[in-house]
Amino acid sequence: MNAIPTRIAGRTGHPIALTRTPFALAGQRIGLLGGSFNPAHDGHLHISREALKRLDLDRVWWMVSPQNPLKPVRGMAPFAQRMANARHQARDRRILVTDIESRLGTRYTADTLAALTARYPSVRFVWIMGADNLADVHRWDRWDRIFGTVAIAIFDRPTYSLKALSAKAARRFAKARLPESKAKALTKQKPPGWVFLHCPRHPESATRIRARRAY
């Protein structure tokens, strides 16, 4: 479905035109799982299903990044290949694989979230990420603005929990953290608001898959 274009200021100050964005109903609770998906794997599916259940979401959008600014171009599979692989791995009708960042021309998460909240003012978005990202999110461009734009759900990952919960972002927004028992209320809270979730861990990772393929 083609969306009515909306224009907002991007990182460079130039307007970004929003066209052909995914369909969403007013009031829906949508989780956003962004990343390179190089490649997508069962770990992504596992965390998405946990988010749907633990946060009472209607859908999860996998936002395949054309190129993560913090990751090297070398070793990155072509975008079309990563999109196709993600669609193959998203074995759940509640998961939508989207190339929205490519269509928006956004490189930074802060710009993508600003665009999405402008286009869907009545949708309650939740940014989903692993504890490893919480530990390093302060390196992201305008990371504090991300916390002020949408709710955030952080999922525990092996060996990262203590580092993540003592990291700069966790300390900066400590008062905005919800107890895990109130995770389903996260989408009702005005940002900033975040929750740290413990769930059965999945051992797979894109790094491990690429390492196996190298042999």
Image (cartoon, rainbow, N blue to C red):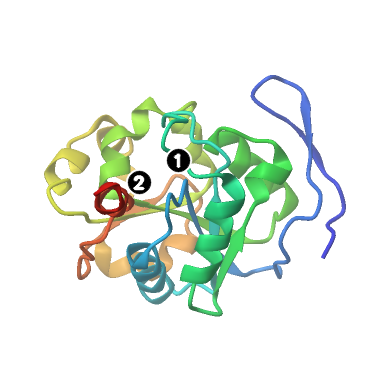
Disc 1 marks which amino acid?
A: Phe
Element type at marker 2? helix
Q: Quadrant of residue 183?
A: bottom left
Vertical order, 41 against 17 (above or below): below
Q: Contact (CB < 8 A) between labels 2 and 1?
A: yes
Residue 30 in sight here? no
Q: Is residue 27 left or right of residue 1?
A: left
- Location of the N terminus by quadrant is bottom right
What residue lies at 61% left-to-right and 51% top-to-bottom? 80
Q: Which mark is residue 147?
A: 1
Disc 2 marks which amino acid?
A: Ala
Q: Position of residue 130 (x, y in %)?
A: 31, 51
Element type at marker 1? helix
Q: Is residue 25 left or right of residue 129?
A: right
Q: Which mark is residue 176?
A: 2
Q: Which mark is residue 138?
A: none
What residue lies at 55% left-to-right and 51% top-to-bottom? 64
Picture mark count:
2
What residue lies at 16% left-to-right and 48% top-to-bottom? 161
In the image, 141 versus 192, the foreground residue is 141
Q: Position of residue 153 (x, y in %)?
A: 37, 55
- Around disc 2, counting alpha carbons within 10 Å, would you say few (fewer than 14), some (14 to 19), or many (20 or more)? some
Could you give the CA–CA distance between mark 2 and mark 1, rounded to whole angstroms? Answer: 9 Å
Q: Position of residue 142 (x, y in %)?
A: 49, 27
In the image, 113 versus 98, the foreground residue is 98
Vertical order, 94 against 21 (above or below): below
What residue lies at 20% left-to-right and 62% top-to-bottom? 203
